[in-house]
Amino acid sequence: MVMGQPGAAVNAWYWRADEPTAAREISAEGLGTSEPLPGSTLRANGRWRSGRWSVVLARSLQGGDAARAAQLQPGLDTGFGVAIWDGSNQERGGIKAFSGEWQPLSLEGTGRS
Amino acid sequence: MAIADERQLAMVMDLNKCIGCQTCTIACKRLWTKNEGMESMWWNTVNTQPGAGTPRDWEDLGGGFRDGVPKPGRIPTRAEFGQAGDYNHDEVFFGGKSQTHLQTKGEQREWGPNWDEDQGSGEFPNSYYFYLPRICNHCTHPACLEACPRKAIEKSRENGIVTVNEDRCRGYRFCMEACPYKKIYFNELKKVAQKCIFCFPRIEQGVATACARQCPGRVRFVGYRDDENGPIHKLVDQWKVAIPLHPEYGTEPNVFYVPPIGPARLGEDPRGRPIRADGPPHRLQVDRHVRRVRSGSSDDRRPVRRAPLARSPYLSSNCARISE
């Protein structure tokens, strides 16, 4: 959760409540290095109902720049984390709530490629 | 201390000459901040002192360094900056009615960038005020630059001008917390921080900043700090008549001020006519706001010497072009 390191990029899917239909896919190799990922196919939509947001972020498993965009494959484990910024609490940049460790992500099935 | 191949542009403002006309403010506004998203930005402000300044009570908002350690600060609110009003221009200029006057639409406003203009302080006949123009100080040790996790703020080696790289800025506004002078604004439309750029495109053409060139009072001197034949070195280092604003903020600002010499303090003779009063000679010195401007480093605390300035050729020429 320190946004990767040089040579080991993290790929982040980013959504914010003030533009609920805009999806942002970024890549970073360390704190303060995030850049928009060119050729991103990420889509997003969010809906505010009964006091909470429901958000869907969608992308093809194999997406965009293979070097920097996470390539997901059924049967292949990867790690993911979640970070949340509460803007009304002045949270932005490195000031955020985040999952402390990588969570395992396994997609069922066998990869065809 | 600057490294040998680094140079620092600086500005000296003679507060005795400022008439508070805001021509500098408008020159800057017309040149740099007239686009959408910049309505509330005033990279150059002129405020009456004693007074709250812009943003309101900015000296209480923290930032900068104390004994080399960053001091926490907070982002000024939009209300403290003073939001741009929406005026009834259509009605006044094109409405065809005679009994209208210019006023803001909607709710009554309670604060603005120059709200306490000319209020000053003191009791008649010893009331007083002076004007304090402010821009980004293009500090030698910029707190904004250090606060930015994205390294979006750059300080030029050629001239020391501090700029925000809007391609790198993500609008986090840590710079706005860190700047002790509260001279960084936020563009709500582009979602980036924006500030005075010391008119660097003009500087690159050898032309002084718009605020300096447009000043009717010729308050401002622009030049390189190390140019011994230029006005900055003479006023700041040689004659020591110009001093930084709040040097205790620890950022080494590069805008310097010739402090105001106040009018004499007045009392009354037995017939009620004003006479020179006993006690401190000037009205200004009694007030803490003036001490702020006056308090430099210990070396700067000596009485301000006026005589050399009066003979200075720069008094009348105002350095229209930057001396190299």
Image (spheres, coloured by chain):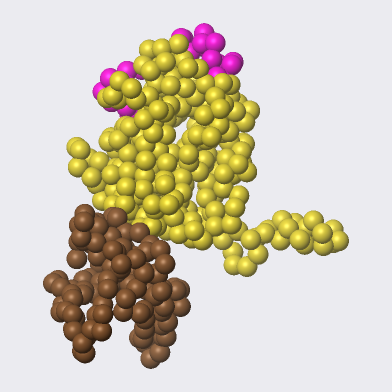
| Residue pictured at 46% horizontal, 49% vertical | B194
Vertical relation: B238 (above or below) A72:
above
Magenta-span inclusion, residue B298: yes
* Colour representing chain B: yellow
* Colour representing chain A: brown
Residue B69 in the image, given as x and y percentages of width and height: 19, 42
Q: Which residues are magenta?
A: B290-319
- Left or right of A71? Residue B269 is right
| Residue pictured at 28% horizontal, 44% vertical | B146
- Left or right of B111? Residue B246 is left
Residue B110 in the image, given as x and y percentages of width and height: 53, 59
Instruction: Locate residue A79: give its quadrant.
Output: bottom left
Residue A8 in the image, given as x and y percentages of width and height: 20, 60
Residue B318 in the image, given as x and y percentages of width and height: 56, 20
User: Is residue B179 shown to the viewer in this render?
Assistant: no
- Left or right of B244? Residue B146 is left
Q: Main secondary structure of the magenta part?
A: helix
Magenta-span inclusion, residue A29: no
